[in-house]
Image: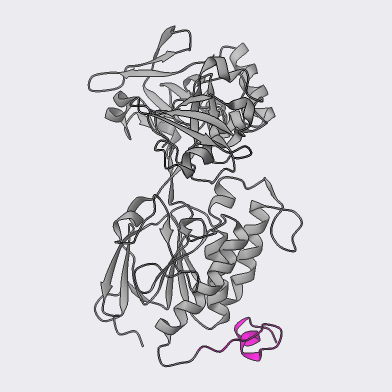
Amino acid sequence: MCEYAGETSLMIKTDAVIVGAGPTGLFCAHQLGIIGLKCEIIDNLDKIGGQCIELYPDKPIYDIPAVPECTGEELTNNLIEQIKPFNFNFYLNDRVQELIQENENWLVKTTNGKEFMTPNVIIAGGVGSFEPRKFPTKSAEKFDGTSVLYSIKDKTIFKDKSVVIFGGGDSALDWAIELSKNSKVSLVHRREEFRGAASSVQKIKELSQKNMINLFTKYSIKDVKGNSSLEEVEIKNENGESKKIKADYVLGFFGLIMQLGPIAEWGLNLDKKVIPVNTENFETNKKGIFAIGDICTYPGKLKLILSGFHEGALAARGCFKYARPNEKYRFEFTTASNTIKDRLGIK
Amino acid sequence: MAKIKYIEHNGNEHAVDVQNGLTVMEGAVQNDIPGIDADCGGGMSCATCHVYVKEDWYDKLPKKELGEDDMLDQAYEPKSNSRLSCQIIVSDELDGLCVNMPEKQV
């Protein structure tokens, strides 16, 4: 069965690789499972759910058919539950870097060194991968990753240091509160109002009154300065006034932006940032590469979750002929098919 | 119908007629005007249709709804006259509106 196993133990052979574990990718996996195909699911976030979980886990969604109201998190959890019987593998915190054609198959290589051999790749990548939005200031690039940071892996590095935090959401507020215990913290935000949790905003105000946090509202970054290491950050307001703050570290929490990333390098036709597909099976200009959900486009395309479900169902059928070239796909209802019930593990 | 002027960061100007009921974002996208990405398609969840509205117009526009400023926090170089163009709905009253695009959206 596994003809590539001898060449490299890392190579995983499968019927389809799904790029993106948002609702569209998850339901497509379900449809693959229903028709008897295997798949592997890769996402560069550290959790399953895509935009639903990263952008609006608590916001209600009102247009999922037959579900009057649910949150992004509930929708994700239900989709995960729905594909449980198939035991598909997820590869999180990983990103598909390269697609290389090998005869009838695609060799899929990820950033973490995983390799898959598959006749089908389904791109369900939303609008690309999430990356932190960075400071607009050129001078910040020089210290990017050393003393200008957009996420925190090890908070002990900030002990007894001067840390300037930018942002008004929960990440900025939570870290300002946490780091104020052991560091000299300044919090800078472009307006008076914060969008973080009310309790955190209250806490920030208390800490500011006790001089545990230096709070600068209506300010934004102007410049970062330092020779070999970061020394200070300059902030400005809209009246043109600026201030200098001593800084060992500068942290920016401006949310995430979506970048198409490596997908742009795969030789696919692109229409701005989306991939044109046919509406029969959502295949792209490359045989065996499909695109579904927000990342695909066709006349009449709606960026709705329900459209992604439909697209995933048809793409799954499109995968069948490449995964099982000697078999004929047979349409079946889940209500009536014993084969499907077996696949779902229903006794 | 309103004539809307979009000014790119490099100074290039595009004046187009936009139908009532469309958003200022849609007016740009449908006319292939560069500088507005609108990744989320108008759902106020991405901040990539960010524009600066000239001061004289800023106060005339309907006020921002809850959530727009939260998204603008995450835009590229937001200022006090920043708006998300997907939240500005075109009407006859907006004839002559002028918006400037930021240097980039992402």
Q: Judge by depth and name the residue closer to the eye, A113 or A65.
A: A65
Q: How is the image coloured?
A: one colour
Q: Judge by depth and name the residue closer to the eye, B77 or A206.
A: B77
**What residue do we see at 65% from left, 85% from top?**
A341
Query: Does the rendering let one see residue A142?
Result: yes
Q: If the image is split into quadrants, where does the N terminus of chain A sit?
A: bottom left
Task: From this view, report whether residue A40 is shown above or below residue A204.
Answer: below
Q: Main secondary structure of the magenta part?
A: loop
Q: If the image is split into quadrants, where does the C terminus of chain A sit?
A: bottom right
Left or right of residue A88, residue B21 in this image: right
Q: Quadrant of residue A276?
A: bottom left
Residue A20 lies, in percent from the top left, at 47, 60
Residue A163 lies, in percent from the top left, at 43, 22
Task: From this view, report whether residue B17 is shown above or below residue A288.
Answer: above
Task: From this view, report whether residue A176 is shown above or below residue B49.
Answer: above
Residue A190 lies, in percent from the top left, at 52, 20
Q: How many marks?
A: 0
Query: Does the rendering let one see residue B101?
Result: no
User: Residue A333 colored magenta?
Assistant: yes
Q: Judge by depth and name the residue closer to the eye, A157 or A254.
A: A254
Task: From this view, report whether residue A204 is shown above or below residue B41.
Answer: above
Residue A294 lies, in percent from the top left, at 51, 56
User: Residue A273 colored magenta?
Assistant: no
- Give, as a single range, the part of the protein colored magenta: A329-347
